[in-house]
Image: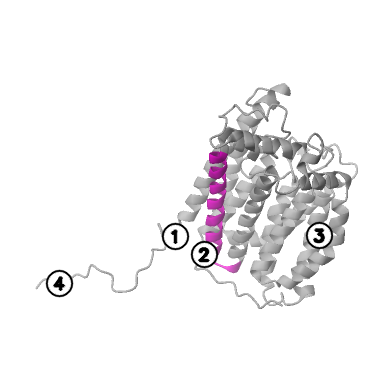
Amino acid sequence: MARRVDLAPSGPLALPTTGIGRGWEAAAILTLTILLLSLGLVTLYSASAFLAQAQGFPDYDYVLRQAAGAAGGLVVLGVCAWIPHGLWRRLAWPMVIVAGILLLIVIAPGTESIAPLVKGARRQIRFGLTFQPSDLAKVAVVVWTAALATRKQEEFSSLRRGLGPFLLVWAALLIPIALEPDLSTAFLVGMTGCLIVYVAGARLSHFFFLGLLALPVLYTQLDVAFRARRVASYLNPSADPAGAGFQVHQSLLAFGSGGVAGVGFGRGRQKLGFLPEAHNDFIFAMIGEEWGLLGVITTVVLYLLLVLVGFRIAARAPDLFGQLLAVGLTSLIALHAVLHMAVGLGLVPATGLALPLVSYGRSNLLITLASLGMLMSVSWAKERPVPVRRRARA
């Protein structure tokens, strides 16, 4: 008698643990990374060719250096993706200590030979290659905050025992960054750290209280001459279009000139000395001018997909540390991109933050690619996620 074979599943349907059900996130991260890198290199060539020739270099000089940085960064991405994400928890304190030492070297007197003053700020260390310690500090804060927040689940009800240790270490890194001066990066790193501990269970009322305490300090910092001019130009860009509002005014002209489809690759006019830092701080405006609204929407969609995949990785992470690490890394990239785009559109005062994977800058590019590799590492972990148990907030 023939044996009966049941072809239909008898239990509830479930996606497999590999394939479309699990494991595609890393491939999606890599694909989106390659697309944004390609967009960045193409836009960078157009935005920097005139500048490079004016400085006596070939027109492809900036894009060649960025491409070399991207190649090295992809190797770093692969290494970080291969390292088990739990190892970063053990490296949290060493990363913070190294970042702190480098930040002190940047602002210390007598180190001008390796940390020169550039455009009114000391942000770089030059030893053959140029590196910004604040970029390392961004990832160090994310890793260390995620590691400590994993152990602080039962203490977030207390401001002193919960947020107190975080504030001390954050201050040790953010104060040197602010003294470079680079207040926008300090603000970005601090906001990312706060998002991590909020997701971990910190009380929202504590953040409001600390925000009130920080208002006088923030006011004194914004009252500094060059920052005050930026704030004034943000509130009324047309008041001084040839002075403090020059960059934002030219950026808006670039977006307005682009229309729906853009003026065409290489045909933008703002890069011809009208828009300062068109290859870096305002490269989003160059996308708007040469690729138009379609280019802007494409760029925003690519970042949106990258962020959504990053938060999906966080939701499916194998443990609490992996969840918080993925939240922090994804938020760091998202805030970077949002603030850069908002500056180009005149929605916030000029910050000087790069557009991740697109703007020129090998130091930021290297750290961004390393962060994406760490995200991929979390996505490849095998265990099932442990949900974050949030405590009731006052």
The residue singled out by tag 1 in the image is 22
The residue that disc 4 covers is 3
Mark 4 or mark 3: which comes first in sequence?
Answer: 4
Circles 4 and 3 in contact, beta carbons < 8 Å: no
- The percent coordinates of residue 201 (x first, y second) are 66, 72
Asked whether the beta carbons under mark 2 and mark 1 sit within 8 Å of each other, the answer is yes
Q: Does residue 260 appear left or right of residue 114 in this picture?
A: left
Answer whether residue 286 is visible to the viewer in this image: no
In primary-sequence order, the first of circles 2 and 1 is 1
How far, Cα to Cα, is label 3 from label 1? 39 Å
Which amino acid is tagged 1? Arg
Marks 4/2: CA distance? 41 Å
Give the mark nearest the N terminus, 3 or 1.
1
Using the image, tell me which numbered label, if any, was put on residue 316.
2
- Provide the residue span drawn in magenta: 293-320
Q: How far apart are marks 4 and 1 (CA)?
A: 35 Å
Amino acid type at image mark 4: Arg
The 10 Å Cα crowd at callout 4, few under 14, some 14 to 19, many 20 or more, is few
Q: Residue at x 54, y 47 (%)?
A: 302
CA–CA distance in space, label 2 to label 1: 9 Å
Seen from the viewer's position, the closer of residues 169 and 291 is 291
Residue 233 point in image, percent of width and height: 79, 44
The residue under the point 86% across, 58% down is: 217
Q: Distance between the residues labelled 2 and 3?
A: 31 Å
